[in-house]
Amino acid sequence: MRLKWESFAQLLSASVVVMSVGAVIGEECTAEGPRLLVSSSRNATGHWTVAIALQRQHAAPRPGNPDALQLEVQPTTTRCNGARTHALNVALQGQPLVGLGYEQVEGFGFYKVHRKAVIWESAREVCEKEGSHLVILNSEGEAAAITRLMKRHKVTDTNVFAGFHDKAEEGNHITVFGDDLENTGFTQWNPGQPDNRGNEEDCGAINSSTGKLNDVSCTKLASSYICEHIVI
């Protein structure tokens, strides 16, 4: 953000609110994102003064989801053809906002392990309501990290639902976003998988011990699942 000193009287007659990336607020809306408040006033000598405040309303900090914010304010002055221009450059950085129960896995993103067993479609709906999606593995490193996450949460189900399926065409596995599974960066299947056992295994899962993929029943199996938060 770049604000000219000469424009503060018009721009900042009231507080200016700068939201962090991903949080947009309107007159009739509310948001939990951090806010940068900038206000100005003229002092007794006729000079403009600027006050900057950082506000954030949130629940108590959660393990694995730090609430640290970084604010950088850099004033600059330029001279050109006898005129001086004062500018204020402001940068605000913070962790993306995620729901309760999500934890950060360093280098990959935010995840939430749901241990209450449900069918695949119900698992997908829960993740979507939380602003997330069923986990999609994109690398061997992420698969290893998710395997450790499942062990830490003492997941006992052999298979944990993941965000892919082949409902439309047998053998053509796609993600919950409609992308080919082959393009995700991780397609390591558990030995003997996918096997479409009983001609009814059309939903995706991750083996909780190996971190590799498996096809399972969409309706006859109730299992744990992992939601992955989309970080833009």
Image (cartoon, rainbow, N blue to C red):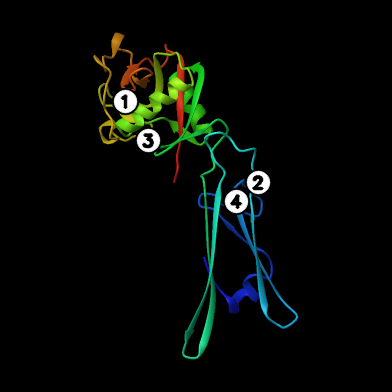
Q: Residue furthest top?
A: 198
Q: Residues within 10 Å of mark 3 (few under 14, many from 20)?
A: few
- Marks 4/2 in contact by CB < 8 Å: the verdict is no
The x and y percentages for residue 107 are 39, 39
Q: Nearer the viewer, residue 210 or 134?
A: 210
- The residue at which mark 4 appears reads as 34
Residues under labels 1 and 2: Cα distance?
44 Å
* Precedes in sequence: disc 4 or disc 2: 4
**Residue 114 in sight in this render:** yes
* Precedes in sequence: disc 3 or disc 2: 2
Nearer to us of marks 4 and 1 is 4
* Precedes in sequence: disc 1 or disc 3: 1
Q: Is residue 128 left or right of residue 160?
A: right
Nearer to us of marks 1 and 2 is 2
Q: Residue furthest bottom?
A: 82
Kindly identify the amino acid type of the residue bearing the numbered disc 3: Phe
Who's the residue at 57% across and 43% down the image? 67
- The residue at which mark 1 appears reads as 168
Q: Is residue 52 left or right of residue 192?
A: right
Residues under labels 4 and 2: Cα distance?
7 Å
- The residue at which mark 2 appears reads as 57
Whether residue 152 is situated above or below residue 19 in the rendered picture: above
- The residue at which mark 3 appears reads as 177
Who's the residue at 37% across and 31% down the image? 136
Q: Nearer the viewer, residue 94 or 122?
A: 94
Element at label 1:
loop
Q: Residues within 10 Å of mark 1 (few under 14, many from 20)?
A: few
Element at label 2:
loop
